[in-house]
Each structure stands twice: as structure tokens, then as C-alpha cells.
Image (cartoon, rainbow, N blue to C red):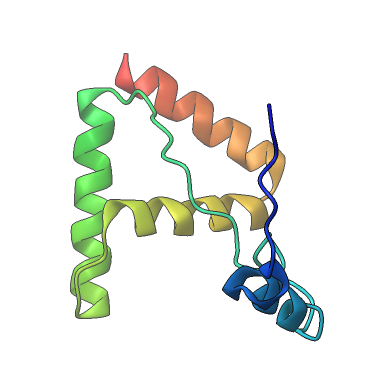
Amino acid sequence: MAKKHLGDASQSKLANQSAEGDDAPEAPRLTSSRRPKMKPTSFRFEPADHARIQQLATRVSDEAGRKVGRSDLLRGLILLGEKTDVKRMLTMIKDAKFEGS
């Protein structure tokens, strides 16, 4: 295949653009420093557990004076669980399991 002579290609827009690009600052990072996106997680609760979560959310919302969602409530309970003694947590888990049966 015969190649076409480009002649005055050094004066083209593409040639000028690449020459200007040499002086440009380094390319932006491909990764961002933003926190990772939340991924949805599903849990299987008994109907009694759903009712408890809703009652707790209502109680907390009344105390806070604004609506507190179930997800926010569960985040708070997770934090409370991290600060609670493990033996006490196990006792509470057993009570919740057998109470629901």
C-alpha cells in the first residue's frame, strides 16, 4: 500500500496541539480521594424485628425532634454494639433469638 506524503503536516492542528501538550502540567490522577461508595447490604429480619426497628426509629425520632431513618438507627446501634461488652451482647443476641421464636 502506497503511503501518501503529508507534506506540510508540521503545521497541522494536531502537530501544534501535541507540541503545546509538552509544556502542560502532568495529567490528572485517575483515582479520586473521595471515600468509597456505600454498597447496599440486605439482612433478613423476622416481622417482629421489623416492628422493633420501626418502634425504635419512632422513639428516637420523637426524642430528636426530627425523622431518624432505620438505616441511621442501625448505624447507631452498630456503634453502640462496638462500645458494649461482648458477653452482654451475646446475652442480648440469645434473648432476641429466643424471644422471636
Residue at left 25%, top 75%? 63
The residue lying toward the viewer, choosing from 101 and 34, is 34
Residue 36, percent from left and from top = 59, 55
- Location of residue 17 (image quadrant): bottom right
The residue lying toward the viewer, choosing from 51 and 20, is 20
Q: How many circles with numbers are drawn on the protein?
A: 0
Residue at left 41%, top 29%? 96
Tell me if residue 18 comes above or below residue 47 in the rendering. Answer: below
Residue 28 seen in the figure = no
Q: Is residue 67 left or right of residue 94?
A: left
- Location of residue 52 (image quadrant): top left
Residue 41, percent from left and from top = 43, 35
Residue 54, percent from left and from top = 20, 47
Q: Quadrant of the N terminus?
A: top right
Residue at left 48%, top 50%? 38
Q: Quadrant of the C terminus?
A: top left
Residue at left 28%, top 32%? 49
The residue lying toward the viewer, choosing from 49 and 10, is 10
Residue 23 seen in the figure = yes
- Location of residue 57 (image quadrant): bottom left
Tell me if residue 60 comes above or below residue 17 in the rendering. Answer: above
Tell me if residue 47 comes above or below residue 65 in the rendering. Answer: above
Residue 5, percent from left and from top = 70, 52
